[in-house]
Amino acid sequence: MKSRSPLVNRIAIVVCAVVLTSIVSMATTLAVSKSIEGNATAINMAGALRMGAFQLLAHAASPGNNHTGEDNIRGLAAKYESSLTNSAITRTIPDTADHPLAKQYRAIKANWEQTLRPGLESHPQGAPISAGMLAATETYVDSVNQLVSMLERRTEARIGLLHLIQIISLAFSILIIVALFVDLRNRVLKPLRKLVNIAGAVGEQDFSQKANLKGSDELAQLGSAFDQMSSELALTYYELEERARSKTEELETSHAALQLLHTASRSLFANHDLCSGAVPMLRELEQLLGIGPIRLYLHDKQLADPVQVVTTASVERPFYCRDHHCNACLVTPELYDELPIEDEDGRRLLLPIRTPGKLLGTLEVWYPADKGLSDTARRLLETLSDQLATAIFLEQQITEEQQLTLAEERTVIARELHDSLAQSLSYLKMQVARMRRLNIEGDKKNAHNAILDELSTGLNSAYRQLRELLATFRLKLDTPDLTTALSKTTEEFSERLGKPIQLTYNLPPQALSPNEEIHTLQIVREALANAVKHADATEISVDVVFESPQVHAKIRDNGKGLPNGGQPVNHYGLIIMHDRARTLGGQVVVQDRDEGGVEVVLTFVPKSRHLIPADAANT
């Protein structure tokens, strides 16, 4: 069975003390009152014994019949003795033999039995009272007075004892009550007041107050529980407050990021340059979410590895950069070394850039491993990848539509040329053939033949140029870049040459507009046609490379070189090549190589050439 707690024990002890005090007080009061019970009767009867003794003496001295007087004295004496030995008196006499009251009562009884009674019984009726008899009676009465006095003192002492017991009980009860109040004040009221104050402070979100109650009673245990509860509530409140603050900051960050994504989405769709449209937005997103660097890779079915087209942090200018005044992605080596990349305990998140049924690229996001990436940040990055996918897909669609439109226009032009100019040239060739059949004699024959030869040469050259132009106009690009078209072109001229033509290509995806791709391809085809037909070359190479911000297309052969070391006059193919280069904002240089052969070099700045100063474009 579980024992009672200290507070209950103290209250039980106090109650027991009060009850015990009351019981003791009542018991002693009852015992004292019992001990003095009948004392008043005994005192009265003892006092009557004094008067009775003198009455007996007076009766003995009065005259009367002897026999009657004798019988009267004896009867009165017996009656007096019965009063002396009455239980009302003997009950007040202690049983202890050496008690003063017992001694005094025995002395009175002995004096009565031995002196006074025999003297009264032997005294003649009516005879005067002798002095001895009177003295004996007075001695007896003095003894009775002493007994009465002793009874009175004893009764008064018992009453005084009763008063003393009552006073002691009252004082003890008061002390117990005072001690109880003090104990209650120190151990109950004050702790309860502290606990109430703590409860009020907790209600006002003040967890600093502590009870600090000592002891092992219920209130001390309750105070310890309150202190522990207050500490736990404080910790919980601070944790909840911190979580609320963190969630608020996260929501604010998310809201700011959503606003940034909303603003950036318009920039992505309005700006046809992915780098300049995405990098500022990605940098702001990195600062908001505490992540970075972020890199964007595009996939190309013609290439084995993805091609990086956007980065937010780079020590050197990326090779695909077109704007040499833009430093958005350039950082110092010290800052780059502090970024959470693979060597700096960073973690990488790869998000696909996809549309339904097509993977366009990959978004690579680096973030600190110790902080991790929140679900909100992950969802925002997924939203960003969807926006990038839409922007890239639309850009590719626009590019393909431009290519298709341009191809359709060129097909229409080619058809018109074939139906008009090609037929006219064929008709002129037939007329020249008819004129050759005419028999012209005399001095005019040589001049006539010379003119016909010139006409035939010009018509053949024009017809050949027209066929090349028609072949070029009918050429279609099946991909957003030049890779496939250049591969097919080199394969076509490799068959004409009888040997493979080496192709080197490293342009970034979407580096050129559809118009720039068509013009570049036509210049390469014209240069290859010249090398195959006129140079008597055995080796030909084509290099189309991107050296930011310029595109270089180089066609080299090991043929016989240019006639007389210079460019042929009135060569329609070269004239068209120069016109196309000027359309691209660049130039074509045709020159002999030191090791033999001819080198055709096309140089131009694609798309954003207006952002590059002229001196930078020519470097």
Image (cartoon, rainbow, N blue to C red):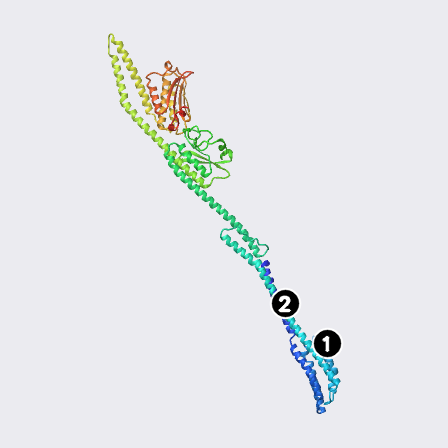
Dot 2 or dot 1: first in sequence order is: 1
The x and y percentages for residue 154 are 67, 74
Q: Is residue 430 left or right of residue 516?
A: left
Residue 1 appears in the picture as rendered? no
Q: Tell me the tag on residue 168.
A: 2
The residue nearer to you, when weighing 356 against 35, is: 35
Badge 2 element: helix
The residue nearer to you, when weighing 468 against 374, is: 374
**Residue at label 1?**
103
The x and y percentages for residue 527 are 37, 20
The residue nearer to you, when weighing 222 against 451, is: 222
In the rendered image of this protein, does residue 27 appear above or below residue 446? below
Q: Tell me the tag on residue 151.
A: none
Quadrant location of the C terminus?
top left
Badge 1 element: helix
Taking the spot 50% from the left edge, 48% from the top edge, the residue there is 237
In the rendered image of this protein, does residue 21 appear above or below residue 600? below
Residue 435 appears in which quarter of the rendering? top left
In the rendered image of this protein, does residue 458 appear above or below residue 476? above
